[in-house]
Amino acid sequence: MKRLSVLIVDDSSVMRKIVEQSVRHAGFDLDRVLEASNGSDGLKMARDGGIDLILTDINMPGMDGIEFLRQLRAQNGASRVPVMMITTEGTERRVLEAIALGAGGYLRKPFSEDQVRRQLSELLAG
Amino acid sequence: MGAPVAVSIVMTENAEIVREFLTESGEALDRFEHELAQLASDPASEALLNSIFRTVHNIKGAAGFLGYSRLETLTHAGEGLLSLLRDRKLSYVAETGVGLLALADALRSILARIAATGHEGDEPFAALVSTLTRLQSMVDPEGVSNTMPLGRLLVSSGRATQAEVERALKAQRDGDTRYLGEILIAHGVIPPEAVNAAIEEQAQAEESAAAETTVRVAVSQLERMMNLAQDLGRVQRDLSRSAAVQHDPVVIRAVRDLRSISSELLDGVSKARTQPLAAAWSSLHRMVRDFSARCGKRVRLETEGGEIEIDKIILEAMKDPMIHILRNAVDHGIETPEARMAAGKPPEGRVLLRASRDRESVVIEVVDDGSGVSPARVKQRAVERRLLTAQEAADMPDTEAVKLIFLPGVSTAANPTKISGRGVGMDVVRTNIEKVGGTVDMQSTSGRGSRIAITIPDKSHLANSHRSSRRPVRSKRNHAGVISGDSVGSPARVEDKTPQ
């Protein structure tokens, strides 16, 4: 399988590490991992291109995951990158919003390796 | 809550993540305490509430992965309380602050234990969890007004300094039970007039905030939303069937969420569709007053049951018929004051508009104490219009005859008045009522008055029973015993077997 460049957007650095590790443990080979702690930084990184997959939290200070997705989709170049939302209980409404904006799926914390494997395989298969 | 499988992800190489977790959480708790102190003087600050919420939320999220279940339970209780505060469903009170500070202390002690031993320990913090849970039950029924607190208002208007307000707030925290304004006056910071002016401003802000909470929505828009909400419910049902087949817990959970969201949405839209009758009736008082003055009559309109809520679409459809019936009552029913006195009635006529609920319908009556409908006149008109033969008219009982006014051409006055003219007849009123599924009936006693009763289905009730509405595919199949052409896209339609 292709080595992936991923962008992880989450305001918690612990969460970013956990997400990264979950993706690795689920069997994905990561080439490059970019981290952003909010939507606007994420957008800047996505703009540079070369990203195969974005995993983003929904609830973040400043630009949240939904606005990040909205602007990402409007941005040339990165608009087709598959996006997986990271959610928690109680954010179902926002998940629907994200799906409507073109998010490819979501993982609800705490997720299992198995869920990550399945969801990401599906998302990346397109 | 808490999928145990998740733990395995990080158990093997979690040392680095745990270190990071302890550092990040420690820093977040410093910020949390600082923000909590600010919140006491500015309990409505959205930025503060969001940030405080996020701290607890992030600790909970990581705790779930790292297998710290006590930490997760504790943060879960805190998160619940904070989400209510953030969503303005709960007012911040001193006790809330105390509870949240205790939460911070408990979180710190657990983090310290993890740092020292690698384990979170087994102290259950049961009392704290129950306090945080109890604080959540103090939900305001009406939500919290989002007006500026007095302290902030005084500072922003330059009447007091931040330090002066904080000193007063500290006094409150230390047990001074007086209002903030009183303390500031006692401290000699501001004169009583300044407090009064600020309270006045606060009240005005509250008023305009209340005004902003309602918006006008076109009935057609509501109808569309209702249909979309019902469509969403159908999509959810289709999805839940395939989710059940696939046994995918993630999809099953998502579908379950979708179900509760779509049903909540449908309820919300249905509720948005109803309005009390009084809302439509309020303009009728003025109409009756003006209209009776122009007819040279004295009429008092009384209403009962205006609090009954009905579907706005029906309310809208009833507007013209109601105006018509009332005009008729004033123009043709109620007599002039002289004629009334001559008949031994009080000079002022009375029209009663009364609504009542009868199982699944609402009955609206218009009762007047006017001259009533003359059965002989109505029969004569019907015969002239060739709706009846003279013999049929002669055989018809008076109670039936008065209902002839709902036939075309009968009610239009033989001698049209200047005011209501020949106008629209009662047949049009009947047609309009029937269009929304209602019926209309009339009773009248010559010389004593009339009673018109409109019965309309309570559609707001129907709207709530969405499971039975707008499901043509199922009903077609059930009636015909075969799957109709419409259902090609979803041949496996069966009764809901969705896992709960």
Image (cartoon, grey):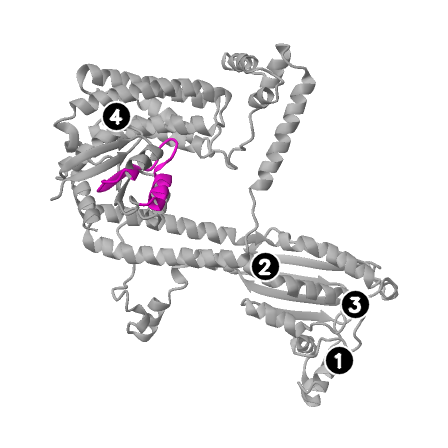
Taking the image as shown, residue B222 lies to the left or right of residue B33, namely right
Question: Local crowd at mark 4 within 10 Å, few (<14), some, or many (≥20)?
Answer: many
Residue at the disc numbered 1? B376
Of labels 3 and 4, the one closer to you: 3
Taking the image as shown, residue B228 lies to the left or right of residue B19, namely right
**Which of the two labelled residues, at mark 3 and mark 4, occupies the earlier sequence position?**
4
**Which element type, helix, strand or loop, lies under badge 2?**
helix
Identify the residue at horizontal 66%, vertical 55% (top origin).
Answer: B281
Cβ–Cβ under 8 Å for marks 4 and 1? no
Residue B299 on the magenta span: no
Residue at the disc numbered 3? B419
Which residues make up the magenta segment?
Answer: A47-76
Return the mark for residue B315.
2
Q: Quadrant of residue B102?
A: top left
Vertical relation: B182 (above or below) B349? above
Q: CA distance from mark 2 to mark 3?
A: 25 Å
Tell me the chain of label 4: B
Tell me the chain of label 3: B
**Which element type, helix, strand or loop, lies under badge 4?**
helix
Q: Is residue B359 visible?
A: no
Residue B399 appears at what percent x and percent y?
A: 68, 75
Residue B63 appears at what percent x and percent y?
A: 25, 28
Residue A50 on the magenta span: yes
Q: Is residue A55 visible?
A: yes
Vertical relation: A64 (above or below) B120? below
Q: Which quarter of the image is occupied by the N terminus of chain B?
A: top left
Vertical relation: B484 (above or below) B8? below
Amino acid on which the number 4 mark rests in the picture: Arg
Of labels 3 and 1, the one closer to you: 3
